[in-house]
Image (cartoon, rainbow, N blue to C red):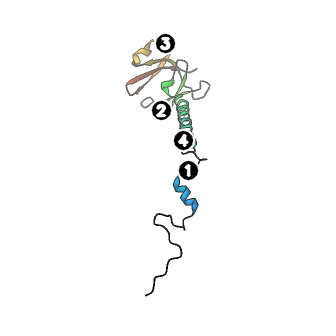
Amino acid sequence: MTTPPIPAAAEPADAEPATEPATERRAEAGPGPAEKPGARRGVPGVLKIAGLVVAIVAALLAAAYFARDTPAAAKAGDCAHNAGNDAKPDVSLVDCNSADAEFTVLKVVHGANEQDCQTEPALVATYVETRRSSVLVLCLGVHG
C-alpha cells in the first residue's frame, strides 16, 4: 500500500493567501495613524464655497453695472436717449455730456400715470414703463 505524499507547506483554512502583498492588506484595514479620515476633504469643500461666494458677488456687481442705464434707475437730472421712435421707444440713460443725450429727466413718478408730469413746465415727452405690477413714468424735457 502506498501513502499519498504530504504537501510541503499546508496552510490553515483561515489564513490569508501568501501571494497577497502586505500593502494591500493595510489599505483594506483603513487609514494609518498619521491620516485622519476626511482631513483632506475639507479643503476642496471650502474652495467650492469660496468659489460660489465669488461667483454670486460677481453676478450682483454685473447686474448693478448693467442696470444703471435702465429707466428704472433714473432720477431727476439724469439724461436719456431714445434709440427707438415715438411708437416704440427704446429709452436708456446716458451721460449728460454725451452726444446721445436728447432728454433731461425732469421728474420720476413711480406707480402713477402720465398726468402727474403735466406740472412740469419744460415737459416735452413722457416715457412709461410697466414692469410686473409697477409702473414707472419719466417726465422728460429737452436736454440743453
> Which residue extends farthest left?
133
28 or 99, nearer to the observer: 28
Q: CA distance from mark 2 to mark 3?
A: 25 Å
What type is the residue that disc 1 sits on?
A: Pro
Q: CA distance from mark 1 to mark 3?
A: 82 Å
What type is the residue that disc 4 sits on?
A: Gly
The label on residue 84 is 2
Label 4: few (<14), some or many (≥20) within 10 Å? few
Residue holding disc 1: 31
47 or 117, nearer to the observer: 47
Residues at marks 1 and 3 touching, judged by CB atoms closer than 8 Å: no
Q: CA distance from mark 1 to mark 4?
A: 21 Å
| SS of the residue under disc 4 | helix
Where residue 137 appears, x then y in whole percent?
44, 21
Q: Which one is earlier in the sequence, the residue at label 3 or at label 4?
A: 4
What type is the residue that disc 2 sits on?
A: Gly
